[in-house]
Amino acid sequence: MQPLRRKPKQLDEEPTVFEAGKGGDGMVLRAEPSRDAGTAKTKPGDSTSGVTDEGAELVLAGTDAADTDPTARARARQIAARLSIRRPRNDGTGQRGAGTLASLPYRGGSDEIDLDKTIEVLAEHPMPDDEDIIVRDRVRTRRSVVLAIDISGSMKGERVQTAAATVGALAGELRHDALAVIAFWSDAAVLLRLGEPVHPMDLLDTMLRMPARGLTNISFPLELAGQQLARVPVRDARVVLLSDCVHNAGPDPRGAAVRLPRLDVLIDVSGEKDVDLGRDLARVGRGKAQLVHGYRDVAPALSVLFGA
């Protein structure tokens, strides 16, 4: 493994995980309690890394919040209109129950025989076994996807709008799947946990209200994504990272990437970037990397990632 082109800042303390919640003045991101007493604490709203056993908060309201921009909403709708994401394939390994109607070998469940498919099988096997009878049954083919979105200081301006629009568009496309969203800088905020109800425009607005801040620690959100996917079958799980990949804080993120079931990377190349690291993350994560110059590139890039 090649050394990193940039020497990242080594963090003296563990980065903080913030959780989304509602406060009296708007959206509030609260830090998770520390598991170790006596550890250094972060101050409310501090962008430096650290864990806390107190109620540190990032309040995304009033002067601390960036204005929501109708332009980003319009971009999200444009991206969504151009998305062409292939649905998961139906086969006998899916979970039976509510889902897509499919033709499957009989296994003691459905009694609705698919005559056409069964006749084709019987033509080759005149003395059929039970599984040679093809029935119609519903199979739930649900992907589990974690979006890790870079909102560090290097992703400000147009880049943050592209990131927010990507979240809104992809959340709408994957609303029937299990989705998690993690925004990150030197710390990270879990905006949506895997399996929670998805409200695409709410996610987009939350992203837009989070000002770009701090250094870029790519390893941390990938570790959090792995935790979200820990109980998900490998074939149904993936992480999508949107970042300029200018990793400048924390450990080498390739160590976290290699432990994921699959990592795809959208590399924002509209400003400062590290394309080599982005491609390396996708390689060790058994996924693909796509270059994004602006929001118009997002839909075709995602279509390539989810078409593979």
Image (cartoon, rainbow, N blue to C red):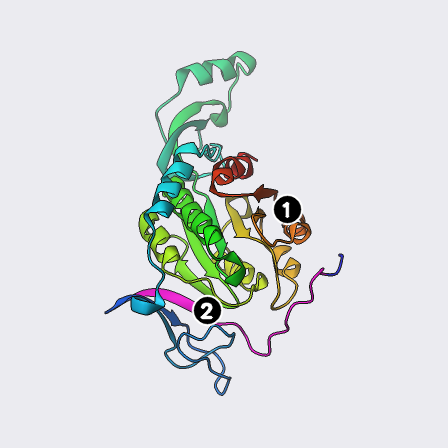
| Residue 196 visible (yes or no) | no
Nearer the camera: disc 1 or disc 2: 2
At 48% from the left edge and 59% from the top edge, which residue is drawn? Answer: 151
The vertical placement of 94 against 157, above or below, is above
Residue found farthest to the left: 24
| Residue 57 visible (yes or no) | yes
Q: Position of residue 266 (x, y in %)?
A: 55, 46
Q: Are marks 1 and 2 in contact (CB under 8 Å)?
A: no
Q: Quadrant of the C terminus?
A: top right
At 53% from the left edge and 14% from the top edge, which residue is drawn? Answer: 126
Q: Is residue 16 magenta?
A: yes
The vertical placement of 141 against 283, above or below, is above
At 36% from the left edge and 36% from the top edge, which residue is drawn? Answer: 99
Between residue 275 and residue 69, name the one nearer to us.
69
Between residue 141 and residue 204, name the one nearer to us.
204
* Count of all numbered marks drawn on residues in the image: 2
Highlighted magenta segment, given as a residue range: 4-21
At 60% from the left edge and 68% from the top edge, which residue is drawn? Answer: 249
Between residue 128 and residue 193, name the one nearer to us.
193
Q: Position of residue 127 (x, y in %)?
A: 52, 17
Residue found farthest to the bottom: 38
Which secondary structure lies at badge 1?
loop
Residue 17 is labelled as 2
The vertical placement of 90 against 45, above or below, is above
Query: Mark 1: which amino acid?
Result: Arg
Residue found farthest to the right: 2
Q: Position of residue 294 (x, y in %)?
A: 51, 43
Which residue is denoted by mark 1 in the rendering?
286
The alpha-carbon separation of the residues under discs 1 and 2 comes to: 26 Å
Q: Residues within 10 Å of mark 1 (few under 14, many from 20)?
A: some
